[in-house]
Structures are given as C-alpha cells and as structure tokens.
Image (cartoon, coloured by chain):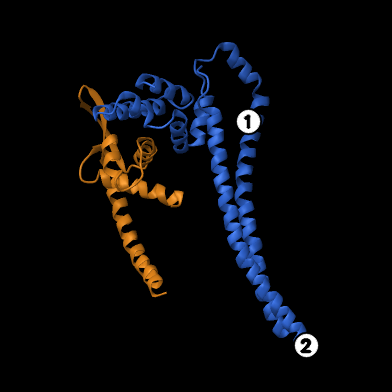
C-alpha cells in the first residue's frame, strides 16, 4: 500500500468523526510515514509497519468519547430545507419523547450495570457479616455444646465462602467492565466509517 | 502487565521523552522503544489524551518542506512526572521488601 492509498483508506474509515479529529489523524499519520521514509525505510514498509487501518481506527476510537461521535453523526451535513423544518416541528410530539426515552434507557442500562456489580459485593458482604453473627450466636444460644459447635462451624464456613466469593465477584466485575468497553467500541464502530456520504 | 497500568506508564514515558526538549512523534517512538513497547499507532491516542489533559502543547514547524508537529511539556505535565517519581519511590520500597521475603524462603 502506498502512502496516498493508506491515508485515503484511513480517512474513509474515520468518516463520522469530526473534521478536526479526521484532519489531526491524517496529519499525524502523514508525518509518521514521511519521517519513516526520511529515515530510509521504503514507502511500502513505512506504511505497513504502522499496522492495519482497522487497528488504527480502533485505537483512535477508544480515545474519542461516544457522545462526541453520536453528536457528530446527528449534526446535519447541509442546511435543512423548509419542508424538513416543518416536518421536524410537526413531528416534535413524536420524536422528542422517543429520543428522550432512548436517552433514559441508555442511562438506566448504564446504572443497572453498576448496580449489578454493587449488588454482588453487597451480597458477599452480607454472607461475611452473617458468618460473624452465627459465631456470636454459637456462644449465646441455649441448646447445648453440640448446637453451639455446629453454629460456629457454619459461621466459619460462611466467612470462608464470603472470602472466596469476593475473588470470584472481582473477576466477574472485571469481566463485565471489559465487556462494556468492547460494547462501547462496537457502538462507536457502528457510527464511524463505512460508506462515504 | 495490566492494561490500565500500562496506559498510565506510557503516558509518563511520553512526558519524560519531551521533558528536556521538544520532540516529534517519530523521535519519541525511537527514544522510547528501547525501554517500552510502543508504536506510532499507540503513541497517537496517548498524545491526544495528554494534549486534552493539558499536559503538553503542540506547535507546528517546517521541516524539509513539510510540516511536523513538535510536542512541548507543560507545567501540569512536569507536575505529573514529579508525582510519578514520588509514588514510585514508595513502590520501590515495597518492592524491595517483597523480594527480600522471597530470598529468605
């Protein structure tokens, strides 16, 4: 791939980002290729050494906030025609609530995500505290030594389970955060790149 | 190494590379590559992040008939490097303690 082909392909894949973002990426990669070539690396190699356009796109997308990408996508590319404005106003009772609902759904999903993680840790904490409660109970109960021993055993077991669960839940939380990042990148990819308008 | 940690470390490495004098993308990669795994494509988002975080400023200068961007560290960037070295002093003490325990085993 030549420098010109690479830059063209990169610009195409970033279509949907703001013009400023695209220009900055283009300038940067042009400079990199020029510097590499100046260093004596042949053009083909200078380009291929940078990685594939898709890899570069993902790296750029990770740093651009999703709200900025969506906003850029929603911005009309040309001035609206009169009938479009009329339609927008007439349709307002329909599209405003729908958009508002979508935003609320997105917010709720986001909240749910953190609440699930919080709930996992709260459950774990409850089992932990319960274990201590049962051990204390073992000393104050009035059903004899055997019952006391049984209760103390249960208490120690609960504390043990709680400690093990803590590590398990931490892995689950890490996995969820990892997945949410992947999902975020996936959503960004839907908005950026593809065909040129 | 954990991703989050690596990300933070790369930020600091880039700041360190422009600490004594302004530098440009390709030079930063060349300066850092003996110490840490970094490529032109990984450097780009880091530079953008540091620029947005006001840790560095960018100026454009002409070089061989084309434009090249030079990165200059800001006060905030220098501050970041200072905090980093202070934090790592603490970590190194812990590291020494941990490895000493291992040797005694």
Which chain is depicted orange?
B
Residue shown at 71%/75% (left/top)? A154
**Relative depth, front residue between A75 and B84:** B84
Q: Is residue A128 above or below residue A24?
A: below
- Left or right: A127, with B82 as reference point: right
Q: Is residue A131 above or below residue A79?
A: below
Q: Position of residue A109 (x, y in %)?
A: 63, 43
- Left or right: A80, with B14 as reference point: right
* The disc label shown at residue A99, or none: 1
Which chain is depicted blue?
A
Which SS class for mark 2? Answer: loop
Residue shown at 30%/28% (left/top)? A31
* Label 1 packing within 10 angstroms: few (<14), some (14-19), many (20+): few
Which SS class for mark 1? Answer: helix
In front: label 2 or label 1: 2
Which quadrant of the view contains residue B56?
A: top left
Q: Confirm whether residue B74 shows in the render.
A: no
Which residue position is annotated with label 2? Answer: A144
Q: Is residue A114 above or below residue A56?
A: below
Q: Confirm whether residue B7 shows in the render.
A: yes
Task: Name the outermost residue toward the right.
Answer: A143
């Amino acid at each position: 791939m030549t420098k010109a082909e690479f830059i063209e392909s990169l610009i195409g894949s970033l279509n949907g980002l703001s013009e400023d973002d695209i220009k900055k990426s283009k300038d940067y990669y042009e400079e990199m290729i020029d510097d590499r070539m100046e260093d004596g690396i042949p053009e083909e190699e200078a380009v291929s050494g940078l990685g594939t356009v898709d890899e570069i796109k993902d790296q750029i997308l990770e740093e651009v906030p999703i709200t900025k990408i969506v906003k850029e996508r929603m911005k009309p590319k040309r001035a609206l025609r009169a009938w479009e404005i009329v339609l927008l106003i007439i349709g307002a009772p329909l599209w405003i609530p729908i958009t508002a609902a979508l935003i609320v759904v997105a917010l709720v999903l986001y909240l749910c995500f953190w609440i699930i993680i919080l709930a996992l840790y709260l459950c774990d904490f409850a089992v932990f505290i319960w274990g201590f409660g049962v051990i204390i109970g073992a000393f104050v109960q009035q059903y004899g030594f055997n019952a006391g021993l049984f209760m103390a055993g249960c208490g120690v077991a609960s504390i043990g389970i709680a400690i093990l669960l803590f590590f398990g839940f931490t892995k689950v939380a890490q996995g969820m955060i990892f997945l949410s990042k992947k999902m975020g990148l996936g959503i960004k990819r839907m908005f950026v790149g593809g065909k040129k308008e | 190494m954990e991703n989050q940690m690596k990300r933070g470390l790369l930020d600091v490495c880039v700041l360190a590379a422009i600490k004594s004098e302004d530098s440009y993308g390709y030079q930063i990669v060349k300066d850092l590559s003996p110490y840490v795994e970094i490529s032109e494509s990984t450097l780009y988002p880091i530079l953008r992040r540091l620029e947005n975080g006001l840790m560095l400023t960018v100026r454009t200068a002409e070089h061989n008939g084309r434009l090249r961007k030079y990165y200059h560290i800001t006060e905030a960037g220098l501050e970041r490097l200072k905090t980093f070295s202070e934090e790592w002093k603490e970590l190194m003490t812990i590291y020494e303690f941990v490895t000493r325990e291992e040797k005694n085993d």
